Image (tube, helix red, strand yellow):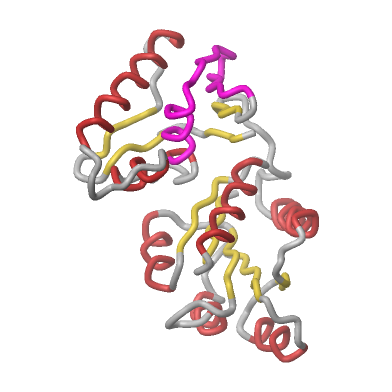
């Protein structure tokens, strides 16, 4: 199941995307309606977690215009729990409603119910062909069980790419994921680090390398991957 998190509070957006990726759902984050439209043009999601209080076009208006999108489930997020917000959300076409701060057990229960309605899906199961990015061990595990030991910097690069769910991470995103200032950082250093990382993966997996360069866009992890 593919999920888009539309939330303008970046810390919360990243926290939700991290949680969703960690339990096995392909997820990306956007901050407003324009970014959401761009993301949906690239790949149609199965579920949209939609903040009711987005800047510009708010969540209720977005839900109203997307309500007839085939196969799309909309779950509204709001810091307010009043009856009026719930009514407006459901009238706009939302399928469910969650109050912030989000209870992750409740969120997971909602996702599991949705996944059971989708053809061929029964929850966030790790497919046999999926890679795994293991946080405590700082490892990348191939679908065949081969393990690549990563440095903290290499893990940050892969984590940034995996969170993009197949879409390219820009050089700026990769630089900032390592805690550097994009304006003063030499971009060629990222290219060198990515090149070394790809070689390390190929050395362990016998040429199986899911990290791909996207010309003019950045780098992408082009294979299913679950973060644990």
| Magenta residue check for 154 | yes
Say which residue appears at 56% left-offset and 21% top-offset: 139
| Horizontal and vertical percent position of residue 7 | 53, 67
Q: Position of residue 156 (x, y in %)?
A: 46, 35
Where 99 falls versus 88 (above or below)?
A: above
> Residue at left 43%, top 66%?
36
Magenta region: 137-160
Is residue 44 covered in magenta?
A: no
Looking at this view, name the residue that lies furthest to the bottom. 84
Q: Tell me the quarter of the picture where residue 25 sits.
A: top right
Above or below, 142 relative to 77: above
**13 shown above or below 226:** below
Q: Is residue 34 left or right of residue 117?
A: left
Q: Can you tell which quarter of the image residue 137 is in? A: top right
Q: Is residue 223 visible?
A: yes
In the rendered view, would you say 58 is above or below 27?
Answer: below
Residue plotted at (72% across, 88% down): 87
Q: Is residue 161 left or right of residue 20?
A: left
Q: Residue 98, how many percent across, how many down?
A: 72, 70
Front in this rendered view, residue 99 or 120: 99
């Amino acid at each position: 199941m593919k999920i888009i998190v539309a939330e303008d509070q970046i810390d919360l957006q990243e926290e939700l995307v991290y949680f969703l990726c960690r339990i096995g759902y392909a997820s990306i984050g956007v901050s407003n309606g324009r970014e959401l439209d761009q993301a949906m043009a690239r790949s149609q999601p199965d579920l949209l977690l939609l903040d009711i209080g987005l800047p510009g076009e708010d969540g209720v208006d977005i839900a109203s215009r997307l309500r007839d999108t085939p196969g799309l489930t909309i779950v509204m997020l709001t810091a307010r729990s009043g009856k009026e917000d719930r009514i407006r959300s459901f009238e706009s076409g939302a399928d469910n409603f969650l109050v912030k701060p989000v209870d992750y057990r409740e969120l997971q229960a909602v996702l599991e119910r949705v996944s059971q309605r989708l053809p061929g899906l029964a929850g966030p199961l790790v497919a046999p062909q999926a890679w795994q990015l293991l946080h405590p061990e700082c490892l990348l595990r191939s679908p065949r069980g081969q393990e690549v030991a990563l440095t903290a910097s290499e893990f940050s690069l892969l984590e940034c790419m995996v969170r993009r769910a197949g879409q390219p991470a820009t050089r700026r995103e990769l630089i900032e994921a390592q805690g550097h200032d994009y304006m003063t950082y030499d971009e060629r250093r990222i290219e060198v680090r990515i090149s070394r990382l790809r070689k390390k993966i190929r050395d362990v997996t016998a040429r199986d390398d899911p990290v791909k360069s996207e010309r003019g866009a950045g780098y992408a992890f082009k294979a299913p991957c679950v973060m644990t």
